Structures are given as C-alpha cells and as structure tokens.
Amino acid sequence: MFGFKKKASLPPGSVAAVVSGKIIPLESVKDEAFAKKMMGDGAAILPEDDYVVAPCDGTLTMIYPTLHAFGVTSSDGVDILVHIGIDTVNLKGKGFRRIAEEGQKVHTGDKIIKMDFHELESRGVDMTTMILFPGHTAGLDIKREGHASRGKTVVAAYTL
C-alpha cells in the first residue's frame, strides 16, 4: 500500500553472501586454518565495499570483541561463523564498527559490521571474508566461483 519493501527470505537451508565481491574457493584462502577447513567448510569472498551483513534469518549469537568475526544461528538451528579478513584479530577492532548487537534477531542482508574496507586494504590487510559452517558437514553445497551481491546471492546451502 505504501510501497514499503519487505526483505525477501531465502529458501530454507540457503545462506547468502555477507559481502559483495568475487567468490573464491575456500582452499585458495591465504590462511592455512581456513584453507584446510579447520574451522569448517564454507565460502570465501574478496569484498569490494564496507558492509558485512547477516547471511540468513536467525539470531546474532556472538560478535568477537575485535569486531572481525561474528556468529549467527539460523532459524533452523545451524551455526554460521563469519570471519572478516586474515589476521584481522591483530587490528583490535581498528577499522571496524558494530552496527548490530549480540542476541538480536536478524534477517538476511541486515547490516552487522561496517568496515573501513578501502583504508584496511590500502594498508595491505587481506580482507578475504569467510562464511563457515563449524560442525556442520552433512549436505553442504558451496558456491566456489562467480560474483556475489551481499544479502542476495546464495553462496551455500545445507540440509539438516
């Protein structure tokens, strides 16, 4: 009636890109822990802008104190870890700003963290961003190439 747009939900078990950018195989990430899937399988994206968003509908269960990582539990109970950049924990929060709060209900595409992408990249920080599924291995289908639009492009799907 008033032209307000309701965010479209993804199909159950679908996970959207948390940043816009080029999708790369997780195995190509320049950090052994991620490349060898020690923290779970998932998708990796080379970001091209400042916002990191919720990958699905659910609850924002954790934001790391240095703001470089956060966790979301999907509406159907799957834990998803988002890790922004390589070795960004060492920045101690510099270049990141919290937008959302732990415990908050989120919808696909809701802004969680704002990063100063161009400043961090100009300082040589590898901003590759990972969307990981710690502890969930059954029925994962991960997109490993292409271009992602944050909150819109499905980069992973899972079955329960």
Image (cartoon, grey):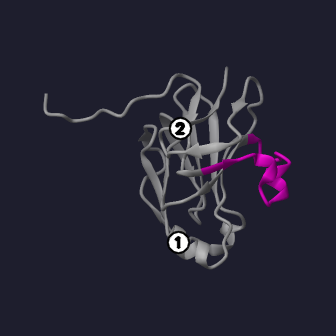
Q: Does the magenta stretch include residue 40?
A: yes
Residue pictured at 58% horizontal, 73% vertical: 120
Taking the view exactly as shown, the residue that stands out farthest to the left is 1
Q: Which residue lies furthest to the front in this view?
A: 146
Give residue 118's mark: 1
**11 to 144, vertically: above or below:** above
- Left or right: residue 9 versus residue 134 is left
The amino acid type, in three-letter code, at marker 2 is: Thr
Could you tell me which secondary element the residue under label 2 belongs to?
loop
Type of the residue with mark 1: His
For residue 33, what is the image quadrant? bottom right
Q: What element carries label 1?
A: helix
Q: Quadrant of residue 85?
A: bottom right
Name the one closer to the observer, 16 or 68. 16
Vertical placement of residue 1 versus 146, above or below: above
Tally of numbered discs? 2
Residue range (magenta): 22-41
Image quarter of the N terminus: top left
**Which quarter of the picture shows residue 77?**
top right
Residue at 42% over, 57% down: 99
Residue 26 pos. (x, y %): 76, 47
Q: Which of marks 2 and 1 is nearer the N terminus?
A: 1
In the rendered image, the quadrant that contains the C terminus is top right
Magenta-span inclusion, residue 36: yes
Q: Vertically, is 9 above or below 28?
A: above
Q: Distance between the residues labelled 2 and 1?
A: 23 Å
Point 53% across, 38% down: residue: 153
- For mark 2, what is the residue? 153
Residue 110: x percent and y percent? 42, 45
Is mark 2 in CB contact (under 8 Å) with mark 1? Answer: no
Q: Where does residue 154 sit, x and y in percent of width and height?
A: 56, 34
